[in-house]
Image (cartoon, rainbow, N blue to C red):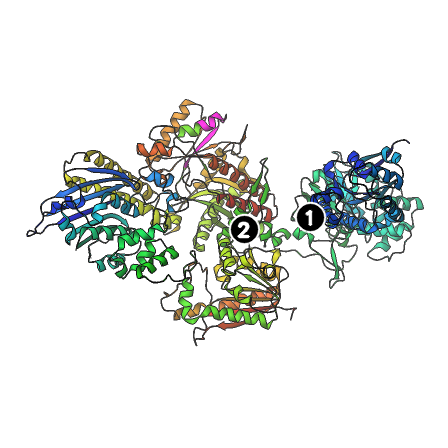
């Protein structure tokens, strides 16, 4: 017997059916991976330590079903190695396949029970009577004919060991699995016979359409010079004026390979009519029927064949795009079942009808959290809008709306208006809303989306994991204190401290920061003054209307100021409003709205004075520490003075003098950061990053650009403070000396320190991201971090032992998460996906790390 | 930080002030240096005249070892930024005193036992002290023991403590040993049961009669209630009282205010009545806190699902214990559950409940986030019945001890008048298809209404 070859889908539930001893297990091992096989014997062994223990059969099958279910849920081909000779056993498996939309495939080993029995005799633990194999075989043969009816979509029967040996199995992707096809696509909404608009739309998209005779039957060719594919979401005909020509063009393009199409409910119904089945000619089918009745049988057959071949949906571009007529839930992507086909054509309905007599649709898109874009039509909408990565591009052309195409992966829509209203919709298209569909949806985020271990894929070549307990902590903080999540599009990363100076009187020194970057081959550094205030993020829009349009907020604000943990910076909203107004005024005055082509901007800034936000900290910690240190040293000096020249007191006095002076220095340093902020003019805002504007995240702009642009802004209003900066090469000795001198003089005047940043903003080295920023703090500033006497020789040597690794790693992860979130916001991702990044930054901040770094 | 002890010898005294050297076992002409677990101790005399002699004990605490050494407290104040611990008199000083003056503290003197047994005039200075409280506390602690307090007034918590008294030296030292950490209210070492013994040993003969013994034991044992109760019991030679759980939260300021009215019980009664009247079978208690309402609802027949939701894991753990869910059998576990959740997010787990309660919860939400709550609860979860209670701000005028304009609890983000509450509730109800009715909670005042108010929302298309 020659080898017989069959093809099965690469995602299927393969059910082996055969009596005991028919050779199922060897067959399975020959054709499938060991991990693909779920065997009843094996399961019996797992639950009872004995694979022949019949008493364990029920539990063993629970395990078998459970294992198979999980594999199918994960879209893995699964082979069931059990006798499965009884109909009810198979029914359970077919049901399982249906639940996970896998094709059930029956592979039957209908082997003579005598052969089976002989085989069993030669194997250990199989010494059951001959009747067992015989009964299995009887039962199997009884059911053989009904397999198709039971729901198996593919059935292979082998009647002898020879046939079993000869069978070869190849696998191929499901029809709907076109993941290798990356487009680019122009996805076109429901045409419904609007041929003129389709022509115009294809023209606008750059397709060249062959000349054709109107009212002919020959197909019309068309193609895009760059090889783009026109992908139709179905519902080609009905209601509109030129159904036949629409079919000629779409069929022509599909035949030529320049177009593709998935099936819509109208196409499905048309096919029924073409096949001569009885259909009610409503919803515009009558128009199409009238046109097609005038065509030849051959043309109608061609149409019927065309529709018959249309798939339920297409899973494209490495799984990043799904096209289906009525959309598709994530758990159905790239799968096949009757349910998938029904969903893809009709959507999910409850059976209820609304006041217009239309089916009530379940809003699957509302709960969609998949990463793949799902593009669909079916329900006419006023405008095509993204909602949770889904877009309905049926913009009701036939109802006088427009015909819309989505260019993908560009994600841009192109529309042409309907030339007229060809049909009256049962209910008016959704009227324009003040919030977009996504924004309306985003008014509410779901707690249960986040209260788990979070896994966030970033565009920085790494996926970050957040443990559940950290997410929960972040959620608590977020819900009790944070600003409205719609404003909170970004949380800033913590900043790495420089490696510790190895010797001398400094704990931190510019040399180590410059060495850090120099060693990693970074020769273009920007060094900026570090201001001592509180970190503030400012979202500033042109006005409240612009804020509402872009952020979907409903609080009437034109912007907000929030802290690095997402809390409102000001308790007093009037003060926040005034600050936002001043900054917006400065942006307006300097023409930056126009230069940056935006209506809003997100600024990263230091807001001073420190005392504006840190009042409680100052009162409870810093001032008492200074007072205590001064008082302690002064009291000792007094006592020593009174004691006179007692031997041995000199050393104590000198130490006490140093301590008093250190305490004074610490007090002076703190005083320099504090002043009364009674009016708006008392504040100083020093922005140092223009994080994002419309359509852009500026983490690809060099810091020199940020500094120069912000310097222009600062000229417009005295509450905006410029930041001193230099561009240096850390390997150039002259530059290094210059930086050290600057750092010394800046910190001697009370400056906090300097920050070193690779000018490129985001820079990858050999081992991942280069630290995006590193601070080098001044000697006196560090007194308020490490205590007044940290630089006494006896102390500083011990303080040099500080672990920086955790802080470095945290800074890097938070940087990635922060900018990932911002990129998502700028790309208009659903808020739930932006919010998870902000939450993740906050969650990481709950990790224990030396707070002095 | 340092302790300065001055012995005064009046002109007619039968002893010399410099006898202080004998009493402390420290030669006045020498510098005495030793180290202890608390830090380096230096003792010298800054004044040695026949009428006045002053011994100075200076303690130098190592600031680095506070964070990194064996005394480190990883999650306390010490790990956080910079602090006053290395500089102020605290339990470190007490430890240093036992090291430096062990004999004297026990009332012994090798060469001047008679003097050690006698009450002598002393001046005491401890500088600096981080006073937790006001100068009145200093007086309340020291005056009953016979001290005069002469501490100058200062701005802020750092004070220069000055006392004088005529007492035996051993008494003075033991008083200081116990009371200095009480003033400071911060213990540097781990509080354990040995602490009680130490406290009792040094407090022998005076602590049990001290009018402030409660605050002294509480602070000395750093709020560890069970230790404190054991100590108080041993002082009074009585049986220990029943312990509160060790981490029982302090009485909420709000409850303190409302206590005479038993308002909270009343609220819970009213809410339970509403649920019963509507024949509710499943209820979501949003902002369940420690589970007071849940504890009450558990007893209600006919309620077969009670789920408490709170944003704080800590609070939920407490509720878990108070509701005894750790001992719950399957039936109770299926009926009563706790969930972490937030009122400003939607939550799919909230779908399908008959009722939701928010008892004294909304006032803890920022006003600008209330729209998210309305959307999540009334727009998305849509229980048939929602019961909301919140304080009536108008009634605050009647609370004694609540300054005008103040809210009842520091975490209240707002408190509403009756009109404000009804306005909000009516709008929310209209927007989401509910009907709202209102009721006062507590005794009605003619002008100010009741202390609390309740809104009952019913979904228009249910019973």
Residue lying at the far top of the rendered structure: A733
For label 1, the crowd category at 10 Å Cα-Cα, with few meaning under 14, some 14 to 19 and many 20 or more, is: many
Which chain is home to disc 1? Answer: A
Q: Where does the image place residue A154, in percent across and percent down from the top left? A: 84, 43
Q: Where does the image place residue B329, in percent across and percent down from the top left? A: 58, 59
Determine the CA span between mark 1 and mark 2: 23 Å
Residue B88 showing in the rendered view:
no
Residue lying at the far right of the rendered structure: A297
Q: Describe residue A70's horizontal placement relative to residue A550 as left or right.
A: right
Residue A801 in the image: above or below residue A367: above
- Which residue is tagged 2? A485
Which chain is home to disc 2? Answer: A
Which of the two discs, 1 and 2, sits closer to the camera?
2
Residue A706 showing in the rendered view:
yes
Q: Where does the image place residue A665, in percent across and percent down from the top left? A: 29, 39
The residue at 57%/40% (across/down) is A464
- Which residue is tagged 1? A391
Q: In which quarter of the image is residue B378?
A: bottom right
Question: What SS does tag 1 mark?
Answer: strand
For label 2, the crowd category at 10 Å Cα-Cα, with few meaning under 14, some 14 to 19 and many 20 or more, is: many
The residue at 77%/58% (across/down) is A424
- Report the magenta residues as a range: A515-529
């Amino acid at each position: 017997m020659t080898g017989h070859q069959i093809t099965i889908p690469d995602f299927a539930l393969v059910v082996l059916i055969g009596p005991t001893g028919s050779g199922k297990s060897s067959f399975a091992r020959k054709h499938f991976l060991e991990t693909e096989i779920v065997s009843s014997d094996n399961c019996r062994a797992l639950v009872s330590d004995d694979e022949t223990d019949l008493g364990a059969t029920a539990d063993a099958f629970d395990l078998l079903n459970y294992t198979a279910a999980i594999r199918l849920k994960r879209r893995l081909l699964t082979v069931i190695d059990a006798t499965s000779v009884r109909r009810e056993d198979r029914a359970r498996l077919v049901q399982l396949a249906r639940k996970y939309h896998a094709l059930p495939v029956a592979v039957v080993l209908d082997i003579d029970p005598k052969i089976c029995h002989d085989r069993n005799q030669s194997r250990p633990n199989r010494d059951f009577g001959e009747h067992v194999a015989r009964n299995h075989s009887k039962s199997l043969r009884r059911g053989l004919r009904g397999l198709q009816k039971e729901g198996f979509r593919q059935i292979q029967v082998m009647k002898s060991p020879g046939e079993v040996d000869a069978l070869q199995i190849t696998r191929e992707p499901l029809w709907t699995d076109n993941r290798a096809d990356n487009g680019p696509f122009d996805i076109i909404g429901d045409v419904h016979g609007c041929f003129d608009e389709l022509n115009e739309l294809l023209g606008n998209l750059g397709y060249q359409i062959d000349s054709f005779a109107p009212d002919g039957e020959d197909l019309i060719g068309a193609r895009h010079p760059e090889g783009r594919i026109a992908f139709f979401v179905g519902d080609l005909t009905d209601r509109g004026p030129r159904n036949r020509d629409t079919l000629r063009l779409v069929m022509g393009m599909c035949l030529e390979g320049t177009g593709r199409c998935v099936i819509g409910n109208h196409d499905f119904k048309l096919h029924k009519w073409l096949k001569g089945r009885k259909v009610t000619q409503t919803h515009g089918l009558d128009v199409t029927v009238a046109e097609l009745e005038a065509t030849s049988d051959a043309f109608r057959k061609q149409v019927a064949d065309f529709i018959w071949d249309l798939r339920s949906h297409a899973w494209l571009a490495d799984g990043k795009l799904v096209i289906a007529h009525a959309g598709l839930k994530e758990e159905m992507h790239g799968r096949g079942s009757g349910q998938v086909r029904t969903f893809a054509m009709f959507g999910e309905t409850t059976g209820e009808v609304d006041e217009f007599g239309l089916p009530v649709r379940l809003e699957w898109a509302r709960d969609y959290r998949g990463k793949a874009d799902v593009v669909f039509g079916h329900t006419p909408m006023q405008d095509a809008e993204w909602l949770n990565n889904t877009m309905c591009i049926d913009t009701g052309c036939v109802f006088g709306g427009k015909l819309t195409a989505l260019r993908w992966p560009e994600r841009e829509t192109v529309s042409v208006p309907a030339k007229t209203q060809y049909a009256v919709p049962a209910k008016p298209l959704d009227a324009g809303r003040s919030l977009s569909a996504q924004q309306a949806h985003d008014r509410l985020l779901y707690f249960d989306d986040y209260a788990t271990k979070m896994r966030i894929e970033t565009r920085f070549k790494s996926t970050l994991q957040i443990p559940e307990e950290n997410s929960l902590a972040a959620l608590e903080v977020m819900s009790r204190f944070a600003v409205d999540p719609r404003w909170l599009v970004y949380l800033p990363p913590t900043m790495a401290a420089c490696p510790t100076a190895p010797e001398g009187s400094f704990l931190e020194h510019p040399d180590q920061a410059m060495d850090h970057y120099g060693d990693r081959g970074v020769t273009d550094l920007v060094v900026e003054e570090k201001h001592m205030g509180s970190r503030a993020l400012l979202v500033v829009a042109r006005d409240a209307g612009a804020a509402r349009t872009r952020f979907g907020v409903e609080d009437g604000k034109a912007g907000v100021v929030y802290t690095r943990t997402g809390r409102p910076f000001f308790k007093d909203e009037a003060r926040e409003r005034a600050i936002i107004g001043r900054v917006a005024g400065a942006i307006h005055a300097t023409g930056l709205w126009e230069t940056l082509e935006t209506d809003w901007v997100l600024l990263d800034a230091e807001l001073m004075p420190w005392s504006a936000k840190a009042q409680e900290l100052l009162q409870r910690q810093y001032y008492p520490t200074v007072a205590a240190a001064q008082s302690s040293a002064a009291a000792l000096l007094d006592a020593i003075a009174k004691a006179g020249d007692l031997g041995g007191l000199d050393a104590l006095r000198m130490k006490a003098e140093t301590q008093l002076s250190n305490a004074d220095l610490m007090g002076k340093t703190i005083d320099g950061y504090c002043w009364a902020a009674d009016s708006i003019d008392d504040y100083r805002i020093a922005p140092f990053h223009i994080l994002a504007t419309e359509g852009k995240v500026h983490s690809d702009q060099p810091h020199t650009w940020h500094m120069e642009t912000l310097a222009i802004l600062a000229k417009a209003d005295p509450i905006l403070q410029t930041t001193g900066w230099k561009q240096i090469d850390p390997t150039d000795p002259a530059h290094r000396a210059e930086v050290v001198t600057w750092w010394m003089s800046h910190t001697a005047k009370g400056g906090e320190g300097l920050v070193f940043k690779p000018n490129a903003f985001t820079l990858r080295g050999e081992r991942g991201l280069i630290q995006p920023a590193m601070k080098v703090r001044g000697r006196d500033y560090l007194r308020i971090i490490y205590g007044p006497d940290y630089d006494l020789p006896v102390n500083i040597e011990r303080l040099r032992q500080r672990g920086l690794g955790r802080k470095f790693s945290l800074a890097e992860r938070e940087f990635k998460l922060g900018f990932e979130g911002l990129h998502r916001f700028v790309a208009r991702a659903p808020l739930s996906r932006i919010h998870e990044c902000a939450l993740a930054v906050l969650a990481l901040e709950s990790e224990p790390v030396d707070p002095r770094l | 930080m340092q302790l300065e002890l001055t012995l005064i010898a009046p002109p007619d005294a039968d002893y010399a002030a410099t006898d202080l050297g004998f009493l402390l076992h420290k030669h006045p002409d020498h510098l005495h240096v030793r180290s202890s677990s608390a830090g380096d101790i230096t003792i010298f005399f800054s004044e040695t005249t026949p009428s006045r002699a002053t011994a100075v004990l200076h303690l130098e605490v190592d600031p680095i070892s506070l964070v990194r050494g064996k005394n480190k407290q990883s999650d306390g104040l010490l790990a956080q930024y910079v602090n006053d611990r290395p500089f102020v008199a605290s339990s470190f000083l007490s430890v240093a005193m036992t090291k430096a003056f062990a004999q004297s503290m026990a009332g012994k003197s090798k060469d001047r036992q008679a003097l050690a047994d006698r009450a002598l005039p002393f001046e005491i200075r401890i500088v600096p002290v981080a006073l937790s409280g006001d100068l009145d506390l200093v007086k309340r602690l020291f005056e009953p023991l016979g001290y005069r307090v002469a501490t100058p007034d200062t701005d802020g918590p750092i004070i220069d403590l000055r006392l004088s008294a005529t007492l035996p030296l051993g008494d003075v030292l033991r008083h200081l040993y116990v009371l200095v950490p009480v003033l400071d209210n911060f213990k540097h070492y781990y509080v354990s049961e040995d602490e009680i013994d130490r406290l009792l040993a040094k407090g022998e003969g005076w602590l049990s009669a001290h009018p402030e013994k409660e605050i002294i034991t509480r602070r000395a044992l750093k709020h560890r209630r069970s230790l404190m109760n054991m100590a108080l019991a041993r002082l009074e030679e009585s049986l220990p009282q029943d312990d509160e759980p060790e981490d029982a939260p302090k009485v909420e300021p709000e409850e303190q205010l409302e206590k005479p009215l038993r308002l909270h019980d009343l609220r819970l009664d009213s809410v339970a009545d509403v649920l019963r009247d509507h024949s509710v079978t499943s209820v979501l208690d949003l902002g369940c806190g420690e589970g007071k309402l849940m504890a009450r609802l558990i007893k209600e027949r006919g309620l077969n699902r009670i789920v408490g939701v709170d944003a704080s894991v800590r609070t939920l753990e407490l509720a878990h214990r108070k509701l005894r869910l750790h001992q719950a059998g399957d039936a109770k576990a299926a009926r009563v559950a706790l969930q972490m959740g937030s009122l400003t997010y939607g939550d799919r787990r909230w779908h399908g409940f008959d009722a939701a309660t928010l008892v004294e919860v909304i006032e803890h939400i920022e006003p600008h986030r209330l729209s998210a709550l309305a959307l999540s609860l009334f727009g998305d979860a849509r229980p048939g019945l929602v019961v909301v209670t919140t304080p009536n701000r108008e009634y605050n005028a009647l609370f004694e001890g609540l300054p005008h304009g103040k809210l009842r609890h520091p975490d209240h983000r707002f408190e509403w008048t009756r009109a404000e509450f009804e306005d909000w509730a009516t709008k929310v109800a209209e927007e989401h298809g509910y009907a709202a009715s209102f009721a006062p909670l507590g005794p009605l005042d003619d002008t100010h209404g009741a202390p609390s108010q309740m809104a009952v929302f019913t979904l228009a298309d249910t019973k």
